[in-house]
Amino acid sequence: ALDEDGEQIGILTVTPEHAEGHFSEKKGLPRILPGHIQISAAIETIGMIERQLGNTRRDLRLIGFDHAVFLRPVLANGSSKIIVKPTSNGDGTYNVELLREGDSESVASINKLRLRRSDETEKEDFSGNQLLEGAFQTLGLVGLDSSGDNLPLLLEIGRTDIVRPGIK
């Protein structure tokens, strides 16, 4: 899709499945979009744009990023949508802004997102999404909801590099 400035963007409808297994289903706890799914949406959007431009036919894999900030929760209720707006930095990296559709409030930003093209024969033991999820769970902060239950929240993560199997 194109935004009002003619820039290519992605739009993600956030469903309950996006939060499956990440947050308690106890009454009263909201189902929200996890941060690693937001980064995955950025990777998928950039891949879609690169394929449309004819720059690649392959999937893109995460190498890392310099900084990611998660500013506000996105409800995973099937009616929430986020706009994924990547900007090339001209050095092979991207800055990505994730905005809530409707009011264009920023929900997250990712700086210096680094990607690589997948190898046609590549079969990864873990996806970048699984690796990010593990890192986020390790670094996550815990907040309390009104009933006193723990709600894991990752607000910010610094430089993160994914080590590709076989590279030492």
Image (cartoon, grey):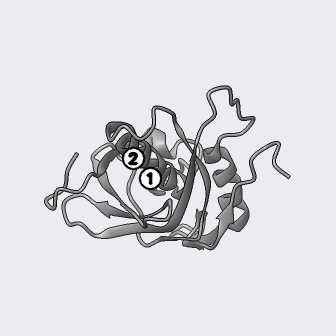
Q: Position of residue 47 (x, y in %)?
A: 44, 43
Mark 1: which secondary structure? helix
The reply to whether the C-beta atoms of the residues labelled 1 and 2 are less than 8 Å apart is yes
In this image, 140 relative to 168: left or right? left
- Say which quarter of the image contains residue 122: top right
Q: Say above or below: 39 vs 79.
A: below
Q: Is residue 8 visible?
A: yes
- Indicate the amino acid at tag 1: Ala
Q: Residue at x 54, y 67 (%)?
A: 147
Where is mark 1, residue-wise? 42
Q: Position of residue 58 (x, y in %)?
A: 51, 33
Q: Residue at x 19, y 60 (%)?
A: 102
Crowding at mark 1 (Cα within 10 Å: few <14, some 14-19, many 20+): many
Q: Say above or below: 142 vs 7.
A: below
Residue at the top extreme of this rendering: 121
Q: CA distance from mark 1 to mark 2?
A: 5 Å
In this image, 52 relative to 25: left or right? left
- The numbered dot on residue 124 is none
In terms of depth relative to the viewer, which is nearer, 75 or 147?
A: 75
Q: Position of residue 98 (x, y in %)?
A: 36, 62
In this image, 2 relative to 27: left or right? left
- Indicate the amino acid at tag 2: Thr
Work out which quarter of the rendered image holds the N terminus and state it.
Answer: top left
In terms of depth relative to the viewer, which is nearer, 159 or 131?
A: 159
Q: Residue at x 62, y 27 (%)?
A: 120
Q: Position of residue 143 (x, y in %)?
A: 58, 72
Mark 2: which secondary structure? helix
- The numbered dot on residue 45 is 2
Q: Say above or below: 82 vs 58.
A: below
Q: Residue at x 36, y 37 (%)?
A: 54
Q: Say above or below: 9 vs 125.
A: below
In terms of depth relative to the viewer, which is nearer, 1 or 19?
A: 1
